[in-house]
Image (tube, rainbow, N blue to C red):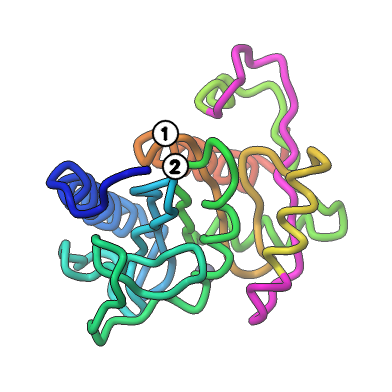
Amino acid sequence: MLNLANTNHTKKIHDAASDMVAYGQAFYAKGWNLATSSNYSAVVSEEPLQVLMTASGKHKGELTTSDFVLVDESLKVVEPDGKPSTTNLKPSAEAALHLAIARRAGVGAVLHTHSIWSTILSERYFADKAVTLSGYEMLKALAGIKTHETTVRIAILENSQDMDEVAEIVNAKIDSGEIEHGFLLKGHGLYTWAASLAAARNQVEALEFLFEVVGRSGGS
Ligand SMILES: [Zn+2]
């Protein structure tokens, strides 16, 4: 059991916030999270579960380390010591989906973007239920992939405002292997996750690159 009051825990929260501030600026510069769209989360404690998330309504290109909320396993906003927080900040509307993924073994961070190419492809390939990425060297940036001679299908799900319902579908599809590195919500954007924030950031960059390649070229 982690001592939530210790300084290592506080430092971990601050470092995760700093990383997500930097990613917000970088992704904004790429046009992947304009205005207040998108959200990011990082697991800062596994037992008990605590997840640091971007607060609702924040512009992702202008985040500061104060623009985050810490939630527990039931999505309650807490202080680092686990006590209820008095902050006015709220988790984003998509927090339940982040938490559902963050709860899974081996997930250290979940990143969500609203890019132009992910939005276009999620509609163009919706009838196929996935965007197929095949034969690209950039696929090696995804966790567990060692060669370009592979095919990755990024599932496309119907968009919804009921994130509990989406979370249930996502968990079932991860369990069945239909979703591995991430998924697209139709007309909405990308969700991807990895063992660490840096690894999840790399996957966002790789997948957004691949979506743009497929989008511009018409497919692999
Ligand atoms: Zn979104």
- Residue most toward the right? 127
Q: Relative to residue 199, is residue 147 depicted above or below?
A: above
Residue 104 placement (x, y as % from top left): 59, 46
Answer with left or right where residue 161 lies relative to residue 204.
right
* Residue 40 colored in magenta in the image: no
Answer with left or right where residue 48 lies relative to residue 214.
left
For the point 65% across and 69% down, the residue is 187
Q: Relative to residue 126, is residue 89 depicted above or below?
A: below
Q: Quick check: marks 2 and 1 in contact, CB under 8 Å?
A: yes
Q: Relative to residue 33, is residue 106 depicted above or below?
A: above
Which residue position holds label 1? 199
Which residue position holds label 2? 108
Query: 175 or 137: nearer the eye?
Result: 175
Three-letter amino acid code at the position of disc 1: Ala
Q: Closer to the N terminus: mark 2 or mark 1?
A: 2
* Number of disc labels: 2
- Residue most toward the bottom? 88
Screen quadrant of the N terminus: top left
For the point 37% across and 59% down, the residue is 31
Cβ at disc 1 under 8 Å from ligand 1: no
Residue 95 placement (x, y as % from top left): 49, 70
- Residue most toward the left? 7
For the point 26% across and 78% down, the residue is 85
Answer with left or right where residue 77 lies relative to residue 102.
left
Q: How would you rate the neighbour count of disc 2 (Cα within 10 Å): few for under 14, some for 14-19, many for 20 or more?
A: many
Three-letter amino acid code at the position of disc 2: Gly
For the point 55% across and 21% down, the residue is 140
Q: Secondary structure at mark 1?
A: helix
The residue mark sitting in front, 2 or 1, is: 2
Residue 66 placement (x, y as % from top left): 16, 68
* Residue 163 colored in magenta in the image: yes
Q: Which residues are magenta?
A: 142-165
